[in-house]
Amino acid sequence: MKHILVVLAVLAAAGCITGNALDGIGDTMAVEKGDHIFVDYTGTLGDGTVFDSSEGKEPLEFDAGAGQMIKGFDDAVIGMKKGETKSVTIAAKDAYGERSEDNVIGVSLTKIRDAGIIDPKVGDVLSMSGQPVKIVSIDGGIVRVDANHPLAGKDLTFKIKVVDIRKK
């Protein structure tokens, strides 16, 4: 493939072929680490519930293998070609990590109220140190908050389609 591209580039430089003759060349190149890519995707849980999707939105764009995405998603796109679609199931450890009880902590109700939350309720999502946390219980002046990502501990399935690749 590289040889064909080199020959076409030489022919184009010599004026033997026009830019239109090059349309579509390179569409079969695979995603490599560092490429800027655009993907459409739908993420589902084990029961089929859709938790995120690009449907009806612009494609998601990121640099492949740069750590901008969860590890399993990043790994899944490497080697895909423009127009290719695949489904991949990503283990929790390569998604948002395993759920940890160490991330469920108690905070005094007074401290929560001092932060401006006058009437906290179980299920409320608050921001602590810039991170979202969910109130899981309120008992005896102690508010227990869960700082685990909502998808922690869950295997995720993604249907991914590479829409475009911009080589590094």
Image: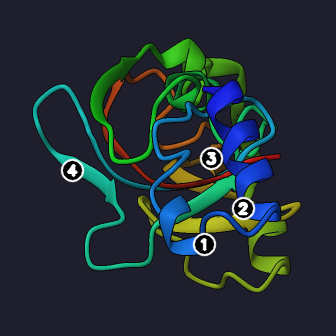
Vertical comparison of 40 with 83: above or below? below
Could you tell me residue 33's position as x and y percent? 76, 30
* Residue 109 showing in the rendered view: no
Give, as a three-letter code, the residue at label 1: Gly
Give the amino acid at mark 2. Answer: Ala
Residue type highlighted by circle 4: Val
Query: Residue beneath label 1, please?
Result: 19
- Circles 2 and 3: CB atoms closer than 8 Å: no
First of labels 4, 3 by sequence position: 4
In 3D space, how far apart are the residues under numbered discs 1 and 3 (Cα atoms)? 59 Å
Is residue 37 or residue 96 the one in the foreground?
37
- Choose the circle earlier in sequence order: 2 or 3: 2
The span from disc 2 to disc 3 (Cα, nearest Å) is 63 Å
Q: Is label 1 in contact with label 3 (beta carbons under 8 Å)?
A: no
Q: Which residue is mark 2?
A: 12
Residue occupying the point 72% across, 61% down: 12
The residue identified by callout 4 is: 50
| Residue behind mark 3 | 145
From mark 1 to mark 2, how far is it between C-alphas?
Answer: 7 Å
- The answer for how far apart the CA atoms under marks 1 and 4 are is 42 Å
Tell me residue 13's x, y (percent): 82, 63
Q: CA distance from mark 4 to mark 3?
A: 25 Å
Residue 127: percent from the left, percent from the top?
A: 73, 67
For label 4, count other residues whose C-alpha is less than 10 Å away and answer few (under 14), some (14-19) or many (20+). Answer: some
Label 1 Cα neighbours within 10 Å, binned few <14 / some 14-19 / many ≥20: few
